[in-house]
Image (cartoon, rainbow, N blue to C red):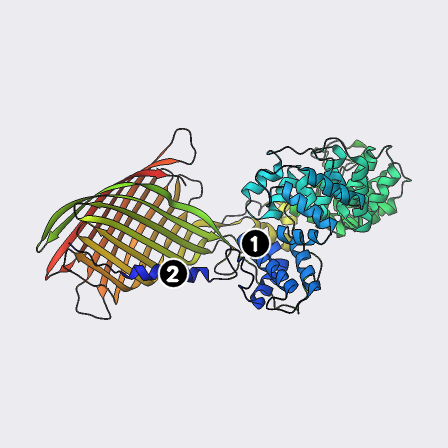
């Protein structure tokens, strides 16, 4: 049998690839100097310096940063834009603040020692530019030494770093975080790696500077404690940058005597400075003045500090102030005001002492008898009276930095939408329904009907994968399905091959599920304001794993196995149905969907008999179940002539069932056995012909 030498897929696939490559800013760095549009590149600059640091779509942010760096080169060299060295410098500054290595390199070449430090830090952190894993080299020591002589305290600290080749936390993070550098560095900083903190501190992140100073004071990650340099760095941040976290760390250092001799007055001075931005510092000062802790007792000052902290949202300040009002002499008590102050802390934590005081109607035991906050005695609540309140900073979380205003000169931009709100951004893989599978498939093809009664055997080598993706911002509502499969081999009819590809994007609509509030009947709930009650009710609202969905896209398939040739291009194709996402459960995913499509071109041929499918309408349905060890797929479709008429319909049934067997010493690598069957029925040469293919796939599945 001689098969047709041309098929629509031969010219369709290149067009599809070209269309995908044209979306948005460049998805791969364009190294050609003259490729691009200055207007589009300036838009990339705007996103990279404003929207991107707040988002999770690091792929889009990386591409925007690269395009912005290229625009800086254009302003330097007068390529498609007038030469503007100031504009180029501002662009490089803005991108280097966002850890774009090429921009830091350009500034370092111009002799800016601060940016040379950034470049060296990125190098030893494994963020690019060096063989992996990187090492702390002599050139890095020279860079840090020169910057230290010019007064760069971060560089001075890096001279004493205890660098462990190949095992540094920030290097491990960088190898797994791709190009999302800021988040990698934040996680490493949270894991007590001074390099991660230094990278963020050097670009103005106050929390990172405070954490770096704390690590240097204790010597964590350093060859020895670097107290004097750490104190100098923290003092510069506290006084010069009005960094409350640095002030708080210094206050603790002076109270504990880390700077030499303990100095309560110096500690209070830094606490006072911290109170302007870190409300818990106000609570510490209030307790000190309440109890006369190494300072003259002054209740009025104590109330002033508590009021400042409580107004700024510090619950401990509100509680201390309320308890002070309740324990005051009868003439100075203010029960109504105290209970009002306690409502905020109680709404935030129903197990806190604030709630117990409310439930006891403001009865607080005398301060001299108190020992435990949780105990009650004679109907009063005992509140711990200790005047010291240690400051334990929360774990360092990812904190975006806005950078200096106007770093990239431009007219005020139109309001920017979040990078995750576009149809083509903000995606993540949520279920590899069947993926990364490679193996061999013996196939038997049987045709019955009219003059066709043949049986053929073939052997194919191929792969297949199906991936589900959903957006992670602003909600898990966008939904995409993508699959690709291919095989090649031969048999009794000659060379055989198969190729298929689907791409469908749309939206997922989760069912809403509201649990009953177990606190509605309690005294605590009744004591709350209506606003606090609403907030508590909303906090127990959740979404169901069950959802409806609708998707649109295209489908391509081509199969020439034995005497049967079957192909179709479906565009547009629409799918709608029900989806269950089980997460890590035994049942990972279940989907029931109906589909409809316009068949642009295609055919169903057996030997020399042909049945063209162009201009037809296809509809059908399918079920897919993905479990931890098994995968089942059932699908049926009817292709009915619509635009041309005069042709009988073609029916197609596609089924598959796979079983995974996990390799003994691997969590991910699995052996895979699949039974695959396809049945097609249509009129050929004046008679109904049925073509049936059955194969067993033996292979390996490297992904889950």
Residue 586 placement: quadrant: top left
Secondary structure of the residue carrying numbered label 2: helix
Q: Is residue 232 visible?
A: yes
Are dots 2 and 1 in contact, CB under 8 Å? no
Q: Residue at x 63, y 50 (%)?
A: 101
Q: Residue at x 91, y 40 (%)?
A: 296
Closest to the observer, 226 or 278 = 226
The reply, left or right, for residue 310 in relation to residue 426 is: right
C-alpha distance separating marks 2 and 1? 24 Å
Residue 588 placement: quadrant: top left
Q: Residue 516: which numbered mark, if any?
A: none
According to the image, label 2 marks what residue? 16
Closest to the observer, 173 or 8 = 8
Classify mark 1: residues with Cα within 10 Å, few (<14), some (14-19) or many (20+): many
Residue 134: x percent and y percent? 60, 38
Residue 524: x percent and y percent? 64, 45
Residue 655: x percent and y percent? 26, 47
**Of all residues shown, which one is farthest toward the right?**
296
- Of labels 2 and 1, earlier in sequence is 2
**Against 390, is 579 above or below?**
below
Secondary structure of the residue carrying numbered label 1: helix
| Screen quadrant of the C terminus | top left
**Of all residues shown, which one is farthest toward the top?**
664
According to the image, label 1 marks what residue? 62
Q: Is residue 326 visible?
A: no
Q: Residue at x 69, y 40 (%)?
A: 139
Residue 475: x percent and y percent? 51, 54
| Screen quadrant of the N terminus | bottom left
């Amino acid at each position: 049998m001689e098969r047709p030498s041309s098929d629509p897929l031969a010219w369709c696939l290149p067009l599809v690839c070209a269309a995908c490559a044209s979306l948005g800013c460049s998805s791969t760095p364009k190294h050609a100097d003259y490729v691009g549009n200055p207007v589009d590149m300036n838009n990339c600059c705007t996103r990279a310096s404003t929207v991107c640091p707040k988002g999770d779509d690091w792929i889009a942010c990386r591409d925007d940063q690269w395009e912005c760096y290229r625009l800086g080169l254009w302003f330097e060299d007068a390529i498609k834009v007038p030469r503007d060295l100031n504009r180029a410098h501002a662009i490089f500054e803005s991108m280097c603040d966002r850890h774009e290595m090429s921009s830091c390199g350009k500034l370092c070449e111009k002799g800016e020692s601060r940016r040379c430090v950034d470049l060296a830090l990125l190098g030893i952190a494994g963020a690019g530019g060096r063989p992996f894993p990187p090492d702390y080299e002599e050139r890095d020591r020279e860079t840090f030494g020169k910057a230290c002589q010019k007064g760069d305290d971060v560089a001075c600290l890096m001279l004493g770093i205890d660098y462990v080749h190949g095992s540094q936390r920030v290097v491990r993070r960088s190898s797994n975080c791709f190009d999302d550098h800021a988040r990698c560095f934040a996680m490493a900083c949270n894991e007590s790696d001074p390099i991660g903190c230094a990278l963020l501190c050097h670009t103005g992140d106050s929390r990172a500077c405070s954490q770096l100073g704390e690590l240097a004071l204790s010597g964590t990650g350093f060859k020895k404690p670097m107290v004097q340099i750490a104190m100098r760095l923290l003092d510069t941040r506290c006084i010069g940058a009005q960094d409350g976290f640095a002030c708080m760390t210094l206050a603790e250092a002076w109270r504990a005597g880390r700077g030499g001799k303990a100095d309560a007055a110096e500690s209070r001075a830094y606490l006072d400075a911290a109170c302007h931005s870190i409300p818990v510092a106000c609570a510490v000062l209030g307790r000190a003045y309440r109890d006369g802790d190494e300072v003259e007792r002054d209740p009025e000052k104590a109330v002033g500090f508590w009021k400042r902290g409580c107004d700024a949202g510090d619950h401990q300040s509100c509680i201390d102030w309320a308890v002070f009002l309740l324990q005051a002499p009868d003439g100075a008590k203010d029960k109504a005001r105290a209970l009002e102050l306690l409502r905020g802390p109680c709404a935030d934590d129903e197990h806190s002492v604030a709630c117990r005081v409310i439930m006891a109607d403001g009865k607080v035991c005398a301060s001299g008898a108190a020992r435990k906050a949780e105990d009650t005695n004679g109907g009063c609540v005992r509140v711990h009276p200790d005047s010291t309140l240690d400051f334990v900073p929360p774990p360092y979380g990812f904190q975006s930095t806005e950078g200096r205003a106007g770093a990239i000169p431009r007219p005020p931009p139109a309001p920017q939408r979040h990078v995750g709100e576009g149809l083509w951004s903000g995606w993540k893989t949520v279920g590899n329904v069947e993926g990364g599978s490679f193996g061999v498939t013996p196939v038997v093809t049987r045709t019955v009907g009219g003059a066709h009664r043949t049986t053929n055997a073939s052997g194919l080598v191929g792969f297949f994968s199906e991936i589900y993706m959903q957006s992670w911002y602003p909600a898990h509502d966008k939904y995409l399905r993508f699959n690709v499969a291919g095989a090649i081999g031969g048999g009794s009819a000659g060379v055989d091959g198969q190729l298929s590809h689907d791409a469908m994007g749309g939206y997922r609509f989760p069912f809403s599920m509201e649990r009953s509030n177990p606190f509605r009947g309690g005294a605590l709930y009744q004591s709350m304001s209506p606003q606090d009650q609403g907030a508590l009710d909303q906090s127990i609202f959740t979404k169901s794993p069950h959802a409806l969905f609708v998707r649109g896209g295209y489908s391509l398939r081509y199969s020439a196995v034995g005497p049967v040739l079957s192909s179709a291009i479906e565009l547009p194709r629409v799918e709608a149905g029900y989806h269950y996402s089980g997460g890590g459960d035994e049942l990972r995913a279940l989907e029931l969907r109906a589909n409809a499509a316009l068949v642009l071109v295609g055919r169903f041929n057996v030997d020399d008999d042909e049945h063209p499918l162009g201009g037809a309408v296809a509809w059908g349905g399918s079920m897919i179940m993905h479990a931890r060890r098994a995968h089942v797929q059932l699908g049926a479709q009817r292709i009915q002539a619509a635009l041309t008429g005069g042709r009988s319909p073609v029916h197609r049934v596609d089924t598959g069932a796979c079983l995974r067997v996990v390799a003994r010493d691997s969590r991910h690598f699995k052996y895979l056995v699949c039974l695959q069957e396809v049945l097609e029925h249509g009129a050929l040469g004046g008679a109904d012909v049925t073509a049936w293919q059955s194969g067993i796939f033996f292979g390996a599945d490297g992904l889950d």
